[in-house]
Image: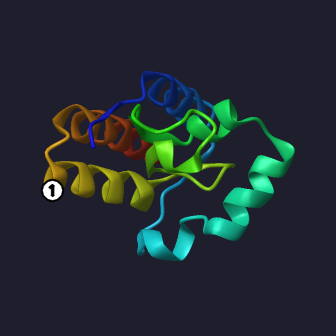
Amino acid sequence: MSISLNKAAVTFAKGLIKDGKIKNDEGHWGQHNPGAKEENAFLQKHEIDEYAQWHLGEDKSQNEDNKGRYKFPYGDFKTVHRDGLIAAKERAAQQGYHDIEKAADELLQALEKKAA
């Protein structure tokens, strides 16, 4: 599985952070990460391209209409979560996706600066 950086998601996240659509939370991403039920509800009202914007990674070996194509979520379909960026950064580092790790770190720094 080869996952690449989803540059459109990075641009989208930067815009959300700039607009103050952030949660400077300090918890476990598992508490805020949308589950399958929330993902499916989002997809009933939105296109897959909008879903993709909430994920920093993209597995291009998967079909474009498949949720499984999109990896490293960072938000709850409304706001960028600090703990979501931390989780994405850590997972990307563990799995050797350094471009995703770097993007998550840059977004995390931008979020923390905005929240200060």
| x and y percentages locating residue 18 in the rendered image | 55, 29
Q: Is residue 14 left or right of residue 45?
A: left
Q: Is residue 69 left or right of residue 100?
A: right
Q: Is residue 69 above or below residue 73?
A: above
Q: Is residue 14 above or below residue 41?
A: above
- In the image, what residue type sits under mark 1? Gln
Callout count: 1
Looking at the image, which residue is at 30% across and 33% down?
103
Q: How is the image coloured?
A: rainbow
Q: Is residue 88 left or right of residue 93?
A: right
Looking at the image, which residue is at 39% across and 46% down?
112
| x and y percentages locating residue 60 in the rendered image | 41, 31
Front-most of residues 65 and 41 = 65
Q: Quadrant of the N terminus?
A: top left
Camera sees residue 114: no
| x and y percentages locating residue 81 in the rendered image | 50, 55
Task: Give the labeled residue for mark 1.
Answer: 94
